[in-house]
Amino acid sequence: MKLIFEKSVPGRSHQYLPKCDVDGVRLPENLSRTHAPKLPELSETDLSRHYTELNRNVHGVNSGFYPLGSCTMKYNPRINEEMAALPGFTGIHPLAPAHTTRGAQEVLEVSRQLLCEITGMDDMTFQPAAGAHGEFAGVLLIKQYHHARGDFKRTKIIVPDSAHGTNPATAAMCGYTVVNIPSAPNGCVDLEALKQVLGEDTAGLMLTNPNTVGIFDENILEITRLVHEAGGLCYYDGANLNAVMGVVRPGDMGFDCVHLNLHKTFSTPHGGGGPGSGAVGCKAHLAPFLPKSAMMDEGEHIQVRSFAGNFLVVVKAMTYILTLGREGIPEAAKNAVLNANYLQAKLKGTFTPAFDRICMHEFVLDLSSFRKETGVSALDVAKTLIDYGMHPPTMYFPLIVHEALMLEPTETESVETLDWAAEVLRKLYALAYEDPEYMHNAPHNAQIARPDEVRAARNPILRYQA
Amino acid sequence: MNYPNELKYSKSHEWIRYEGDVAIIGISDFAQDALGDVVFINLPAPGDEVIAGDSFGDVESVKAVSDLISPVSGTVLAVNDELEDSPELLNQDPYAAWIIKVEGVTQEEELLSADDYEAFCAEEG
């Protein structure tokens, strides 16, 4: 399809504003543009068709199955959007006097209480804009905690080798040395490896539980106890909270602070669909260092972002929690786990699971022996899935599994959709033995053929070149 | 897969050979094949210290970013700048595309011969 700039015709536009009937004011010469900005000029019809065409060419959770592992692409209920669109929320200004925005403050307070209850934390901030930002704020809490006690010898953060890449990146950005520990053969934390690296220089441990291979670490209480014994704190990466929300609480597992991806677990659009919210919760001993919103009537406060963060995302998350309620939240988590296990079981006898056991909300397939036999890679399978109207699963992650495909169906998929997905995957498994060439060249029916990812990465063109 | 006899290998898939006292380090054929097309490399600067078993840079392929692990401790004498513009050389000829040269080597990781490394890769892969 054509870019919007290519559809532009000089002089064409759609005007809604009446003619200006007061004298214009000119900015001083040094503040004025020398050229008009290069904006596309289109009629409303063309513009509307352009965006509708874009919409047709995109695969979102509203267009089909989207089992992108570790991303929780669940359906976002429409009622969330309706609440976030209420004029009382959209029409307020963050600098408005506090007594005029009590409703918005109540949203933040109610959400804070609900999410503290779900995570087992004592306090929470909604300032961080998304997950990685939340991690950064969370690890800074840990750092500040140690420093406030005059403890400057703790320079290391421990991260398992199965972690999301943002964990070591966060620790490094916070000025820590990252200590990578290998996973045990079952994909969980190797307790002996952990004991070896724990010491007086341990600032903390960053962990996802269930972890990135979709397994709940049964040693979690022992892990957090060991870290605390060494004087470190435990950070919970909330990426996989969808598997356990309302069932198990990070606070009860022994974690001191946690970030949530409200845009994943609590059903707000993401992945190009909207801004995130990386809420950070903590136990009471870290609460004094927690960033606060300037919207709260207080003098001194620490901020990591302007005002209340992505406030409307919090409105959507609160709507989701209140809609599902105390029974619905754990039920959603349990259905997410059930759906993942159902799909994993349906694929038995085809792609090999990386860990052949009951999984949590997602599971990882290991295609390395399949690739050796057929020459078809995880990438080829992912690209062929596009032709079937399925969004590819997460590929080549976690790094500890070679040729990985990670599937997270989420709780909002029906048994019919899961059956269909299993059937498509079984079909591709067979196809790889019959016609590997077809799969090397997939997709065949998508809007574009397989892009040259290597060229795109080596010579990226990042802006429109007229 | 190619495992030249005159090189030594680390279990983290780097190769090493010596020219006099200078250690020359790159990544193995197995490593470049497992990584896939390399699109970016992060190199140290001459004069930097490297420590055996620690990362001295990283390579990014279309699949993932991976650490480059130094098989020796010492000081970086030279880096192969050409790789910054042409990281694909690592895929095309991994044994010609050296990455760093290290002088003043004080420590060396346990290294494998070509035969042992080939057996090690067969097990891994």
Image: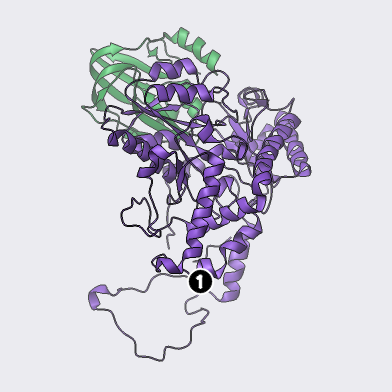
Chain colours: A purple, B green
Q: Is residue B78 visible?
A: yes
Say which residue label 1 marks: A8
Residue depicted at 37% across the width and 34% down the height? A171
Towards the viewer: B61 or A394:
A394
Left or right of A351 in this view: A423:
right
Q: Determine the chain carrying the residue at label 1.
A: A
- Residue A130 sits above or below residue A161 on the image: below
User: What residue appears at the point 30 percent right and 29 percent down from the top-left corner?
Assistant: B80
Q: Is residue A78 above or below residue A326?
A: below
The three-letter amino acid code for the residue at tag 1 is: Ser
Percent from the top left, x then y, of residue A400? 52, 25
Place of residue A153 in the rendered image (x, y in percent of width and height, measured from the top left): 27, 27
Q: Residues within 10 Å of mark 1 (few under 14, many from 20)?
A: some
- Residue at the image point whose x is 53% and y is 79% from the top: A14
* Nearest the eye: A360 or A393: A360
Q: Nearer the viewer, residue B3 or A105?
A: A105
> Left of A328 or right of it: where is B7?
left
Residue B19 location, quadrant: top left
Q: Position of residue A156 (x, y in %)?
A: 34, 27
Counting the numbered discs, the total is 1
Q: Residue at x 41, y 40 (%)?
A: A138
- Disc 1 secondary structure class: loop
Q: Is residue A420 shown above or below B20? A: below
Quarter of the picture holding the C terminus of chain B: top right
